[in-house]
Image (cartoon, helix red, strand yellow):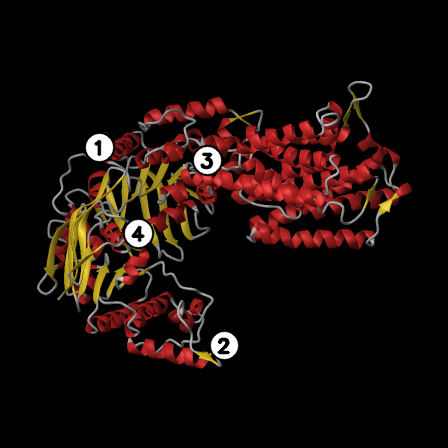
Amino acid sequence: MTLLSIRGLDKSFAGARALSGASLEVRAGEVHALMGENGAGKSTLIKVLAGVVKPDAGTVEIDGESVTIASPADALRLGLRFIHQELSVVPHLSVAENIFLGRDYPRRWGVMIDWDGLNRAASAVLAGLGVDHIRPARKMARLTVGDQMLVKIATAFQDISLGDGAPALLYVMDEPTAALSAEESRRLFAVIRRLREAGAGIIYVSHRLDEVMELADRLTVLRDGATVATRDIAGLQKLEVIELMIGRRFAEGYPPRLAPVSAEVALGVEHLSTAYLQDVSFDVRKGEILGLAGLEGAGQSEVIRAIVGADGGHDGAVSLAGRPVRIDEPVSAWQKGLAFLPRERRQEGLVSSASIAGNVSLPHLDDLVRFGLVLDRAAEAEQAVELGRQVKLKAKGPRQKVRELSGGNQQKVVFARAIAGKPEVLLLDEPTRGVDVGARFDIHALLRQLTAEGKAVVLASSDLPELVYMADRVIVFRDGKVATIVSTEGLDQAGLAALCFGAPAAPSA
Amino acid sequence: MASALKTYGTLIGFVLVVVFFWIEIPDTFMTAKNWLNISQQVSMLAVVAFTMTIVMVMGDFDLSVGSMASLAGIVAALAFRDGHGVWVGVALALIVGLLGGLLNGALVAYVGILPFVATLGTLTVYSGLAFLVSGGKTIFGRDIPQAFSGFARSGISLTETVTLPSLTIVAALVLAAVWFTLEQTTFGRRLYAIGGNMEATRLAGIRVRRLRFFAFGLSGLGAATAGLMYASRVASANPTQGSGLMLDAIAAVFLGMTMSEEGEPHVAATLVGVLILGVLGNGLTQMSIDSYVREVLIGSIIVLAVAASSLGKAKG
């Protein structure tokens, strides 16, 4: 029986297509994996189901009836439940209270809460999912993330047991295991299987191919906003899935290397360890682009953040051009000739209330003062104009507010800031994410030019073609450790993807 | 229209208030003497509001300014009573203000307490200290040297009847210093960046904690300055005399914030906020209207101004 049927879903954001004709069909009693690269359209599709994003075109049917999901309340009423990493739980309340939040608690004498009754009811709900290790009186905050997730599922699950107008029940789980231990994941899978037996449909989004192969019944692959294929898991090979996800793309659209890599080491990292990283060592040479790859959260961003001291200190040694340096906060990184482009442009990169010039000059204000403390505004504007020209920024002028710019041009502002201090090493975390094709090419061309001038670039990216065609070598991270370091010579996307997913490498790689 | 109302609404409101009093009190309101009088009346509030602007630029608050002003006045008066000279008393009070402000800064920037909570705590501490060191009594009369109390009565004669008060000059100097600091120095531009996006600013290599620490120090220094001005004006010091300053200062900055496109504080706009409060107080007093009415009016104006500017934002 088909529970959910999505057809011809289209959605564009500011001219960029996120979904173009995506479709998905989920049956009752199945775990249906939804896969695709970053930017393939998975999260947009989920947001459409959640009533957060309104599609431009397309139909959604639940239980054979056409529905419109205009708000999260609609999604709830239609029996859709969403479980993701950022759980909305009330940490100060108990497990039982979280489960029964928003409905009447059992009472004594009409006024007092019947705590025993409440806890018993919560236990019953949890037991219905086969969960018996969580005490209902415990504060939510004291549970592990995995257990919180189970409670959240229980909350959604008791809606059916109470029969609150939930005709179909569909769980959408977005990377639920990203923060879970192996043991917690195992418990979650057991609960998911129970939900499946109870006749619910589960859309399961994950980058972890092994998990998907173990848990799911079928999978649908999205690429560039469209549905590429829906397959039964039985008899499917991992490599087939990877190929479906990345398709066959070409090296076109990447600027060629301008100069060979030097033998001199620009940045050396030895035995770097933090809460997320274990014993990471590598070096980057002048004129080299070193790619950092891996699944989301495998350690690529964390390495860059650790080197610039974004999260405080770390164990291990960092050296610049052979000289050991100590960097515990970003200010020392900039002072020592490291430039940093953070991953989240809006939260970590830009001061959007400020002008282009104000954003570009931010780390370099000390170079723009007269009489020791007065900001030389003319020089600041001049700097922004000059760098704007180098990065091919399209703007009205150096005093235009950054918030008025397109995503690609905003990214160029952050880029201009990074190169303004003539750094020797650039640490770039997803520099082309959410950037249009033109701006992306400009940024790539700039990287080629910088490396030709002898700069070293560390490039963390989830865009595999970008790594394969731009980087000289790629480090693949897995669970905070260096899994392997490979040359991109002769490497193709499928080979790199296989390394990221931890699958056996294709023979050519 | 909506955007004009958003940007100029507060200024238009100010002009309307002025015109209203000009019509209602035709003889005395719109005179140079009265305006200089207003400038003196608001000078203490102005100094606190200007330095408060420095911390509010970063998106922070300093609730302790009122009790710091009281404490500073008491410290100076106690120094006078012990026979120290004017400059010693003034210097001690300013040092106490700076240190108290830096303590706020340390709590906010290095310990990581929310400014609201940290300065609410120090508000109580400073107020308690003012009572403690003064024994809860007003220090006045012969304890306060003539040279100190005379300052607030002095000024520069412009004509035979019109004098530019010294307190007004102090406020103007503080205004100039804060304007220079916020608008012209790299220190000020960094504070604005922190207010715009603290995390991005930190990652761009700005020493956010150190800057917040010093900015709170300046706010404490401003509060102490205002406390000295007040003590000089009333030729006495008591442990509660600065308590009205804090709310009015924050109100003035908020009124000013409604005038900027990005909703960020600028010290020139804070001046308009201060003048709105000052003109209302002056005009209503001259019309012999109860001071409680003034409070109702001021509260309503703040809510109206902020509501108008956020309505404009929601639409734009």
What residue did someone put label 3 on? Answer: A363
User: x and y percent of residue B35 in the render?
Assistant: 71, 27
* Closer mark to the observer between disc 1 and disc 4: 4
Say which quarter of the image contains residue B218.
Answer: top right
- Residue furthest toward the top? B159
Q: Amino acid at mark 3?
A: Pro
What residue did someone put label 2 on? Answer: A111
- The chain carrying label 3 is A
Q: Earlier in the sequence, mark 1 or mark 4?
A: 4
Q: Earlier in the sequence, mark 3 or mark 1?
A: 1
- Marks 1 and 2, Cα distance to the nearest angstrom? 75 Å
- Would you place residue A460 above or below residue A123 in this image? above
Q: Amino acid at mark 1?
A: Arg
User: x and y percent of residue A129 in the render?
Assistant: 28, 75
Q: Secondary structure at mark 3?
A: helix
- Marks 1 and 4, Cα distance to the nearest angstrom? 43 Å
* Closer mark to the observer between disc 2 and disc 4: 2
- The chain carrying label 1 is A
* Closer mark to the observer between disc 3 and disc 4: 4
Q: Earlier in the sequence, mark 2 or mark 3?
A: 2
Q: Which mark is residue A257?
A: 1
**Residue B211 seen by the camera:** no
Q: Amino acid at mark 2?
A: Val
- The chain carrying label 2 is A
Q: Secondary structure at mark 2?
A: loop
- The chain carrying label 4 is A
Q: Amino acid at mark 4?
A: Val
Could you confirm whether marks 3 and 4 are on the same chain? yes
Instruction: Work out which quarter of the rendered image holds the N terminus of chain A and state it.
Output: bottom left
What residue did someone put label 4 on? Answer: A52
